[in-house]
């Protein structure tokens, strides 16, 4: 005869967790590292599966920059700043010169875009310098 004994589960199954800051600095660093890697993997997969261009820049709680991009951070940032996300506007058009691409950018002023490019270039140099220090 089979006995009617209730079996207890070894775990409570997948539980919903509250999103809040992790107070323990060591656990926070480990979580940041794992989630950063996961984010970069997802960005790389998005690019590989769809042909999208993407750049992800993350700063750790200690201020260290980490970047993942395809095809390159420079190219993605330049394309973003110049406004070349319209369909059919490829890299060839960007290579024709900043001024021509800037004129085509939804009525934005050329000087304003150049200031933005200069600021992004400063940021890029800073991120690359800090990334080299981290490596």
Image (cartoon, rainbow, N blue to C red):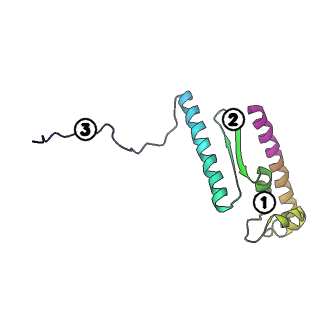
- Between 123 and 39, the one nearer to me in the picture: 39
- The span from disc 1 to disc 2 (Cα, nearest Å) is 26 Å
Q: Which mark is residue 63?
A: 2
N-terminal of the pair, mark 1 or mark 2, is 2
Dot 1 corresponds to which residue?
79
In this rendering, the answer to whether 17 lies above or below 49 is above
Over which residues does the magenta segment extend?
122-135
Which percent across, then down, holds residue 23? Answer: 52, 31
Q: Which mark is residue 54?
A: none
Q: Residue at x 81, y 54 (%)?
A: 116
In the image, which is nearer the foreground, mark 2 or mark 3?
Answer: 3
Q: Is residue 42 magenta?
A: no
- The span from disc 1 to disc 3 (Cα, nearest Å) is 57 Å
Q: Residue at x 81, y 63 (%)?
A: 91
Quadrant (top left, top right, bottom left, bottom right) of the C terminus: top right
In the image, which is nearer the foreground, mark 1 or mark 3?
Answer: 3
Badge 1 crowding class, 10 Å Cα cut-off, few under 14, some 14 to 19, many 20 or more, is some
Secondary structure category for the residue under label 3 = loop
Secondary structure category for the residue under label 1 = helix
Q: Residue at x 83, y 48 (%)?
A: 121
In this rendering, the answer to whether 101 lies above or below 12 is below
Q: Is residue 64 left or right of residue 1?
A: right
- The span from disc 2 to disc 3 (Cα, nearest Å) is 46 Å
In this rendering, the answer to whether 88 lies above or below 69 is below
Q: Which mark is residue 8?
A: 3
- Between 3 and 20, the one nearer to me in the picture: 3
Counting every numbered tag in the picture gives 3
């Amino acid at each position: 005869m089979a006995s009617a004994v209730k079996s207890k589960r070894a775990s409570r199954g997948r539980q919903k967790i509250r999103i809040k800051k992790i107070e323990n600095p060591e656990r926070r660093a480990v979580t940041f590292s794992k989630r950063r890697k996961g984010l970069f993997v997802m960005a790389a997969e998005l690019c590989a599966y769809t042909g999208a261009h993407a750049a992800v820049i993350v700063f750790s709680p200690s201020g260290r920059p980490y970047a993942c991009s395809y095809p390159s951070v420079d190219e993605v940032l330049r394309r973003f700043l110049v406004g070349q996300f319209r369909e059919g506007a490829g890299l060839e058009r960007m290579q024709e010169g900043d001024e021509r691409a800037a004129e085509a950018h939804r009525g934005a002023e050329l000087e304003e875009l150049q200031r933005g490019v200069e600021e992004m270039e400063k940021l890029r140099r800073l991120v690359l310098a800090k990334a080299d220090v981290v490596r």
